Amino acid sequence: MAKVYYDKDADLELLKGKTIAIIGYGIQGRGQSLCLRDSGLNVVVSEMEGTPNYEQAKKDGFNPVPAAEAARQGDIIQILTQDHVQAKVYSESIKPNLKKGKALCFSHGFNIRFKQIKPPKNVDVFMVAPKGPGALVRKMYEEGKGVPSLVAVYQDATGNALKIALAYAKGLKATTAGVIETTFEEETETDLFGEQAVLCGGVTELIKAGFDTLVEAGYQPEIAYFEVLHELKLITDLIQERGISGMRRGVSNTACYGDLSRGPRIITERTRKEMKKMLKEIKSGKFAKEWIKENEVGRPNFNKLLSDGDNHLIEKIGKQLREMMPWMKH
């Protein structure tokens, strides 16, 4: 079983007198910055001038500075830009401003795991990864609850990396909920696998396959949309609240029997073998190399795949049907 840390295991005083530099004021960057500041910590944020995120940071009472300046000021430098730009930001703005005893912090291990960022040996490198989007991190903080998070130490130069990481997590109130110890390797590999095989890739292909099957059999696309996409939220909400067994007891017996007896005909042994192959590609670095290369050449395959998906009939039908559901508009 994993080691879990709570409030009693973390000392916020370790961060008093230190400056935390947040590089990137997106959803996660904003959530973490506001929480850390409200915990009484000194936070400096970096964002590109002229962007909506830059303006949001100013509205929130920060004075955004360039990444290099934030890294110069920061004792703890949290990199919250998107994965594919982190290595560039690090090499151009952060690396020249790293000094012995500083710390690099991440909320996802991609660039460390796949060696796009190679930190010097004299700095701490750790991860604090909330298991929820930045808006939820902020909301739970304001309610005094916190979001469960992961903590990992990649490099302990000072001998205090874990203590500093737990103090950072406490600044987000994550230790109120519980902070689970992991490694950069485990977090990165399981995160990528979950996205590809289940949460994004698996689910979207399953939805489209179900939709196509019904439409090709002559059923109205509007009805197909409701049955294979719209009602998915009901099921995932039940699973999240009660687990799979609880979901099965929250739907009709007919649905439950169909689940138990037919589900394995969809997720077959062949599917499981393909999942193992995908995991192997992640662990070997094959997927990472492919994604890094894709960004280097201007994302031709990414853009084509995204466009193809946008043009699927389910998107046209979905847009029309969502217009009938004003409660779904934000």
Image (cartoon, grey):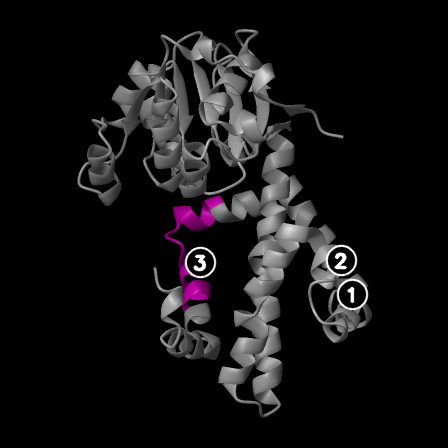
Q: Which element type, helix, strand or loop, lies under badge 2?
A: helix
Residue marked by disc 1: 268
Dominant secondary structure of the residues highlighted in magenta in the image: helix
Q: Residue furthest front?
A: 143
> What's the amino acid at mark 1?
Thr
Q: Quadrant of residue 266?
A: bottom right
Residue marked by disc 3: 302
Q: Position of residue 87 (x, y in %)?
A: 41, 32
Q: Position of residue 289 (x, y in %)?
A: 53, 44
Q: Which mark is residue 272?
A: 2
Name the mark nearer the viewer: 1 or 3.
Answer: 1
Q: Residue furthest bottom?
A: 218
Tags 2 and 1 touching, CB below 8 Å: yes
> What's the amino acid at mark 3?
Phe
Span colored in magenta: 292-307
Q: Looking at the figure, which quarter contains the N terminus?
A: top right
